[in-house]
Image (tube, rainbow, N blue to C red):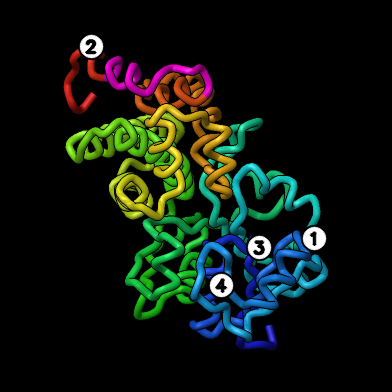
Amino acid sequence: KGHLINRVCVIGAGSWGCSISTVLHENGSDVTIYHHNPSFIDSLLLNRTHPRLPGIVINQEIALTSDVNDLENIDYLFVAVPTQSIRNLFKTINISSNTNIVSLSKGIEMESYMLPSQIILDITGHDRANVCCLSGPSHAEEVYKGIPTTVVVAGGNMTLNRNIQALLSSTNMRAYSNSDLLGVEIAGAIKNVISIASGMCIGLQFGDNTTAALITRGLNEISRLGKAIGAEESTFYGLAGIGDLSVTAFSEHSRNRKFGIEIGKGRDSKEVINEIGMVVEGYYTSKALHEMAINENVEMPISESVYKILYENLSPKQAIIDLMNRELTHENN
């Protein structure tokens, strides 16, 4: 390669994109953050702080750009944009076929029911050996502060996984490797829907018992759909599964949970989304998931309830009553 320092570009200057850029920079990579909106890049250049992460400075050595030409000659591309924006993003940028792509997005595309890495492969025609994903319980706000965090790098190419592990791992962050890309991505997508449900329970003023039940039964649903589409069951008991689900369902940082709390209080979803001002992935994923569950013939009562509340005006309180009154079954079914 001629250069020993890895040239890394992070696409998406949201809180997670900026956060992961800081980790990569501190570990010695040459980092550029790309964002499609020039005026947002200008404000970041001016203040070197992210509006959603006040008090946290983006290092002067991290380049900030809105010029697609700055994406040439890079070794690793980290994609930190909402799932529903991935396809359009790759239509606007030109990436060399030997650039390794790491997806940081969590969701399911509404039109195609594709997961983030599948969308990337579909539009770039990349070799799947050059694509992996990063997941796990990792709120940007905490990663930024150097709070110990573990993540998982998933993909079929173990050499690439190991390289990404090395790029990210430090005293504050530990990256594990997993070959089950499908399982890690499906877990990352569905946990946002379950997290909306856990928020709804708080909005309805239920307690910890309810949230714990929801996480447990939610994991059961994730695992059921995952197995139906060929994922490995063990993945759902790892960082991308129970790990990410727990942090999203319990944490005040979670925007899906925040969204759910307001819906639980009886508010309109569009109004709440505008108020949060960030993409609530679970809102879109719940619609795609509804179709997927039907197509795969998998029962997903919690996810289905979230869908009906958001898209069919079912009242959150009625949804809980319906869930509690379902036919009694064996726990492991």
Give neighbour class at mark 4: few <14, some 14-19, many 20+ (Cα, 10 Å): many
Viewer can see residue 72: yes
Residue 328 at x, y = what percent? 18, 14
Q: Is residue 140 above or below residue 199?
A: below
Give neighbour class at mark 1: few <14, some 14-19, many 20+ (Cα, 10 Å): few
Q: CA distance from mark 2 to mark 3?
A: 47 Å
> N-terminal of the two: label 4 or label 1?
4
Task: Tell me the SS state at disc 4.
Answer: helix
> N-terminal of the two: label 1 or label 3?
3
Q: Is residue 47 left or right of residue 268?
A: right
Q: Is residue 276 left or right of residue 37?
A: left
Magenta includes 10? no
> N-terminal of the two: label 4 or label 2?
4
Q: Circle 4 sits on which residue?
A: 21
> N-terminal of the two: label 2 or label 3?
3
Q: Circle 3 sits on which residue?
A: 11
Q: What range is drawn magenta here? A: 311-323
Q: Residue at x 43, y 65 (%)?
A: 141
Q: Are marks 2 and 1 in contact (CB under 8 Å)?
A: no
> N-terminal of the two: label 2 or label 1?
1
> N-terminal of the two: label 3 or label 4?
3
Q: Circle 2 sits on which residue?
A: 327
Magenta includes 322? yes
Q: CA distance from mark 4 to mark 2?
A: 48 Å
Q: Are marks 4 and 2 in contact (CB under 8 Å)?
A: no
Q: CA distance from mark 1 to mark 3?
A: 13 Å
Question: Magenta span: helix, strand or loop, mainly?
Answer: helix
Judged by depth in the image, the label closer to the viewer, 4 or 1, is: 4
Q: Is residue 248 above or below residue 171?
A: above
Foreground: 258 or 15? 258
Q: Quadrant of residue 93?
A: bottom right
